[in-house]
Image (cartoon, helix red, strand yellow):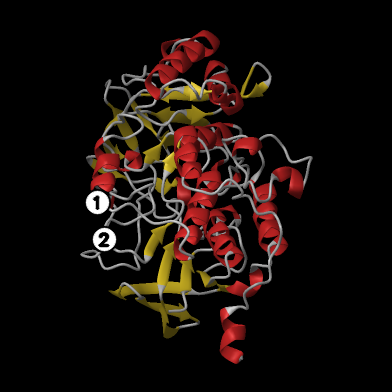
Amino acid sequence: MKKKVAVIGAGPSGITALKNLLDQGIEAVAFDRNHDVGGNWIYSEDESHSSVFETTHIISSKTLSQYEDFTFDDFDPETADYPSHDELRRYFQAYAAHFNLYPHIRFGIMVKHCRWIDEETWEITTEKDGIEEKELFTHLAVANGHHWKPRYPNYPGEFSGEFLHSHHYKKAAPFKDKRVLVIGGGNSACDVAVETSRVSKKTAISWRRGYRIVPKFIFGKPSDKVAEQSKWIPPRLRMFLNSILLRIIIGKNEAYGLRPPTEHFGATHPTINDELLHKIRHGKVKPRMDIKKFEGKKVVFEDGKEEEYDTIIACTGYWLSHPFFDKDFIDYSSGPVPLYLKMFHPKITNLHFIGMFQPLGCIWPGAELQSKLMAQELIGNWKRPENLEELCEKEVKNPDFKQINSPRHTITVDFHRFVKDLKKQLPKNYVSKTPTLKVLSVEQNQET
C-alpha cells in the first residue's frame, strides 16, 4: 500500500520530519497554522503561538543546535554562538527552501482532530478559514512542539494587579516604572527578570526551589561545548563534576541571596543565563522566596516578607498537549510518557512523535535523527523491536537522570546519550545534504 504521511507542525521538528520522509520518496504533507516555517521562532509583538520575546536568544550553542544535513555554516558562517530568534527563524526557513519543502506544507491550517482507524489509516480533520475538511493518511508524525500551552501556578488568595504568563510576555517596554514580580527560576524567568529590570521601578524574582545558574561561556567557550568534553563520563559522575566546576566559577547561590539547590545536578534543568547574578549583585533584581498567598496587590512570601506589585509574570512552563487526540486515546499532559526512543508508541505502529523530548541541550539534532529513523522504518530498512512495550516501560523506569516529579521532567533525556542511541539505529551514511525532488506535493498529486 502506498504510504502517505501527515506531519503536524512546520516548526524545527516538523520540517526535518517532512524533509527526511521526502528524501526516501515517501509522500508527505505538513500542516501548520502559521504563515511560514519556524514555529515558536516566528516572533510577533501580538499574542500568538510563539513563546519567544523581543530579546530571545537560544540557550544552547549553535554547533550543538544544528541539523547535520544543513549546518549553521551552510546557512551563514557568521551566525552568532547563541543565535537570536530572528537568526533561527531565517535558518529554519532557509532549510525549508534549500530542501524544497514549501510545496509540501499547507499553511494557515489547524489540525482539529486525528482519528486512528487501523494500522494503515488515520483520518485527519483540519480547519482553514472556518471550513473543515477530512483526509485519510496511512501514517501520522506528530511534531507540534511542547512550548505553547501555558501552565499557570496556583496560590491562595487573589492578585488584583496584572497577572500574565511568560508566553504572553513580548518585550520589556510595557513594564516601564512598574513593580514587577517574576515567578520561576528557569530560562524564561531569568531572562524576563533581567529584561524588565532595565525599565521597571522594581523587579523581583520568586523561587520555590533552588536552581543552578550556568553561564553561557566558560573558559571563553560556550558552556555546552565545555561540557561536551566530558560526555564519555557516566551521567551521574558527569553531573557531579559539572556541579563542582560550577561552584568554582559561580560560587554558592546564597552569596547572591538565592535559595540553594536541594537536588543533585541534573535533577532539574539548569538555567543558562549570564546576566541574572550580575543584576542581583547590582541591586536591579531582588531575590525572593516562594509565594505564600496573595492579598490584592500584596504578595506574602513564605519567609513572611510582604510587598506590593503592579504586575506578576509567571514563567512556570508549559503543558505537554495534543488537543487533536481524544483524551481517552492519548494524553501525556501528566504522568509518564512511555515511548521507545521518545518516538515509538508501544501499540500503534503508524504513529511517530518527533521532537517530543527535553534534552539538557537542544531538541533539533535529536529530532532530525528521529525523523531519519522514522523514514528508515517506513521504507523497510529498520524494524522496531518485538519487545517494544517492554522497552517503553524500561525507558520510563530508567531515565537518563533521576529528576524531581513534575510535569516538566517527564520527557528529559541526556543529549549526548540520546543522540548516540539514535545514531546506533541508522546507517552510517545517514547525513543527506542534497535537495531532492523525488515527490510531488500532495496537491500536485491530486491534480494529476
Q: Is residue 405 visible?
A: yes
Residue 434 or residue 317, whichever sits in front: 434
Quadrant in the picture for the C terminus: bottom right
Q: Read off the residue under disc 1.
A: 389
Choose the circle earlier in sequence order: 2 or 1.
2
User: Which residue is depicted at the point 33% across and 51% down?
Assistant: 385
User: Which residue is depicted at the point 44% across and 40% down?
Assistant: 421
Q: Read off the residue under disc 2.
A: 347
User: Which residue is depicted at the point 59% across and 50% down?
Assistant: 430
Q: Position of residue 391 (x, y in %)?
A: 28, 45
Figure check: 400 above or below 351? above
> Distance of mark 2 from mark 1, alpha carbons?
7 Å
What's the amino acid at mark 2?
Lys
Residue 359 or residue 249, whichever sits in front: 359
Tell me: 164 left or right of 292. right
Q: Is residue 143 visible?
A: no
Q: Position of residue 94 (x, y in %)?
A: 71, 57
Q: Position of residue 183 (x, y in %)?
A: 39, 36
Check contact, mark 2 vs mark 1: CB within 8 A.
yes
Q: In the picture, residue 149 is in which quadrant?
A: bottom left
